[in-house]
Image (tube, rainbow, N blue to C red):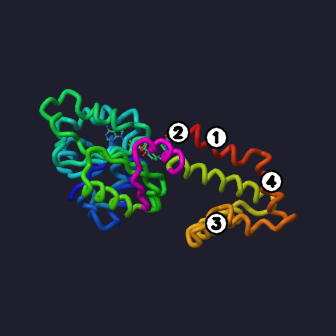
Amino acid sequence: MKITIIGSGNMGGAIAKGLSQGSIFQASDITCTAQTDETLEKMRNINEDFNLTHDNITAVRESDLVIIAVKPWRVQSVIEEIRPVLQFDKQIIISIAAGVTFEQLNSHLKKSIASKVQVNPVIFRVMPNTAIEVKSSLTFISACNASEDQINLVLSIFNELGKAILIEERLMEAGTALASSGIAFALRYIRAAIEGGVELGFYPKQAQEIVVHTVKGAIDLLLENQSNPEAEIDKVTTPGGITIKGLNEMELSGFTSAVIRGLKASR
Ligand SMILES: NC(=O)C1=CN([C@@H]2O[C@H](COP(=O)(O)OP(=O)(O)OC[C@H]3O[C@@H](n4cnc5c(N)ncnc54)[C@H](O)[C@@H]3O)[C@@H](O)[C@H]2O)C=CC1
Ligand SMILES: O=C(O)[C@@H]1CCC=N1
């Protein structure tokens, strides 16, 4: 099975790297395209067995799956470029572009190809986060015109790069805010805690080590105990103790509502 990734930037490059280390594709099954020699060189340094090219059309011709990993405003022009060689009856098309709907993808794919409109393209919207680089992405997947086997294939591809969850398209924007932008929100908490740690007297490197391991501990508790945050917080907050004073001060400054407002603004 061959896969082409159009656009080897942050996400496309990370997906190719992760896939080359998994069990479904060899690096030689993966073709990465890019606009610049510099990006192709970056991919060559990750794995010299990748097929690397500037030519999207040739790359698509030889593939079973095509991942479109360019910025959302470039999706239409990429589809227009590759449309003449796409084979809707054989190929799976995956878009990772945030906010680009199945309706838009279908309309770009089917435009002015009368002979192909009889066969509906199999399309997936896939929404990873940047932790895909270390095979730890929470990735949402929605399917359009796909069979169960095709859905299972795409799920298994992205489960090798972290955890993949199948959702209805109507939840894709919420999922993007919660998990794809969400990784930046989690990192911003970590940054804030590090800054607080420095003010409390730790050197930045020490503060980062402390905060990262503390956050990892919180995550391990939730995953291993299968519990919820409030149950774990209750174990920390001694009545009249210092933790509840800190939490209440954070809430007075709008902590929870700031997070919720941020998530809603990101949709
Ligand atoms: N960065 C993130 O955290 C996430 C990004 N996404 C989506 O992933 C997509 C890619 O985002 P990034 O990787 O962050 O962007 P990026 O800018 O790092 O990568 C895009 C790459 O596509 C290349 N490119 C542009 N036009 C091309 C063409 N015609 N042919 C071949 N290559 C072309 C660019 O040169 C660049 O290397 C976007 O649509 C974004 O919405 C989705 C989830 C998370
Ligand atoms: O900020 C963005 O638009 C992209 C999509 C989700 C994460 N990064």
Segment tinted magenta in the rendering: 162-179
Mark 1 and mark 3 lie on one chain; the one further toward the N terminus is 3
Could you tell me what secondary structure mostly forms the magenta stretch? helix
Q: Mark 2 near mark 1, Cβ–Cβ under 8 Å?
A: no
Q: CA distance from mark 4 to mark 2?
A: 28 Å
Mark 1 and mark 4 lie on one chain; the one further toward the N terminus is 4
Mark number displayed over residue 248: 4
Q: Secondary structure at mark 2?
A: loop
Q: Residues within 10 Å of mark 1 (few under 14, many from 20)?
A: few
Q: Secondary structure at mark 3?
A: helix
Q: Mark 1 near mark 4, Cβ–Cβ under 8 Å?
A: no
Residue indicated by mark 3: 218
Residue type marked 4: Asn
Q: Position of residue 248 (x, y in %)?
A: 80, 53
Mark 4 and mark 2 lie on one chain; the one further toward the N terminus is 4
Name the mark nearer the viewer: 4 or 3: 4
Q: Residue furthest top?
A: 112
Quadrant in the picture for residue 6: top left
Q: Which residue: 73% across, 54% down?
A: 195
Quadrant in the picture for residue 57: top left
Where does the N terminus fall, quadrant-wise? bottom left
Q: CA distance from mark 1 to mark 3?
A: 23 Å
Q: CA distance from mark 2 to mark 3?
A: 26 Å
Residue indicated by mark 2: 267
Mark 2 and mark 1 lie on one chain; the one further toward the N terminus is 1
Mark 4 and mark 3 lie on one chain; the one further toward the N terminus is 3
Residue indicated by mark 1: 261
Q: Which residue: 80% across, 47% down?
A: 252
Mark 2 and mark 3 lie on one chain; the one further toward the N terminus is 3
